[in-house]
Image (cartoon, rainbow, N blue to C red):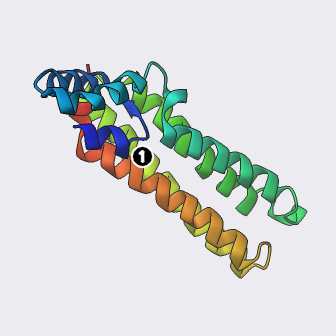
């Protein structure tokens, strides 16, 4: 459980925190130095505290700024599509967080978010093919979305850790 704390960047769901507290209670004196680490953990109260949400939001804003330089003839096609899909990643995470007490609804929204992240990656490929952005920019954003997708998949694999 303590490794879960480290993997999630010091943010645990309520169930994970309770399990960590029980784990620490059973430790010997030399292990209790880890207890100080538990005090640094915090319970997540809002979707804005999720690392995956902040990554998705900042990536969507980066795409918004980037697409301002795209040609005007793309305004109602590529620009609209990539902005919509990138924003949808963050909004679906917010919806999922609010539905976390219903495991199937939680997983469905996270899955929607994962799909939107993959769609955003395809639009990034189109942006490079149309010479609107360079490979380096695409690769950086692509990696950000790979990171987001990885975090979403981990949440989907263990929805019980996020429910209450």
Count of marks placed on residues: 1
Instruction: Indicate whether 74 appears above or below 51.
Output: below
Expressed as whole percent of the image width and height from the top left, the position of residue 45 reads 45, 18
Q: Can residue 114 be seen? A: yes
Expressed as whole percent of the image width and height from the top left, the position of residue 97 reads 41, 28
Residue shown at the point (76%, 50%) measured from the top left: 64
Residue identified by numbered label 1: 112
Expressed as whole percent of the image width and height from the top left, the position of residue 145 reads 53, 58
Frontmost residue, 145 versus 85: 145
Quarter of the rendering occupied by the N terminus: top left
Expressed as whole percent of the image width and height from the top left, the position of residue 111 reads 37, 47
Residue shown at the point (59%, 51%) measured from the top left: 85
Instruction: Indicate whether 35 appears above or below 137.
Output: above
Q: Can residue 77 be seen? A: no
Instruction: Indicate whether 3 appears above or below 82.
Output: above
Label 1: state its secondary structure.
Answer: helix
**Residue 158 location, quadrant:** top left
Q: Report whether 51 appears left or right of 75.
A: left
Residue shown at the point (33%, 37%) measured from the top left: 5
Q: Report whether 15 appears left or right of 59.
A: left
Q: Report whether 30 appears left or right of 114.
A: left
Frontmost residue, 37 versus 116: 37
Residue shown at the point (66%, 73%) measured from the top left: 126
Q: Report whether 141 appears left or right of 133.
A: left
Disc 1: CA contacts within 10 A as few (<14), some (14-19) or many (>=20):
some
Q: Spot the residue most to the front.
A: 30
Quarter of the rendering occupied by the C terminus: top left
């Amino acid at each position: 459980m303590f490794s879960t704390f480290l993997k999630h960047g010091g943010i645990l769901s309520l169930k994970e925190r309770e399990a960590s507290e029980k784990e620490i209670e059973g430790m010997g004196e030399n292990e209790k130095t880890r207890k100080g680490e538990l005090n640094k953990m915090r319970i997540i109260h809002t979707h804005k505290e999720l690392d995956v949400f902040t990554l998705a939001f900042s990536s969507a804003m980066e795409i918004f700024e980037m697409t301002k330089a795209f040609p005007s003839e793309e305004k109602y096609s590529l620009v609209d599509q990539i902005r919509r899909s990138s924003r949808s990643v963050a909004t679906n995470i917010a919806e999922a967080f609010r539905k976390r007490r219903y495991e199937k609804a939680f997983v469905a929204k996270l899955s929607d978010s994962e799909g939107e992240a993959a769609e955003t990656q395809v639009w990034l490929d189109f942006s490079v093919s149309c010479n609107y952005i360079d490979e380096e920019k695409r690769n950086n954003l692509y990696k950000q979305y790979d990171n987001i997708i990885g975090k979403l998949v981990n949440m989907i694999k263990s929805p019980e850790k996020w429910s209450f």
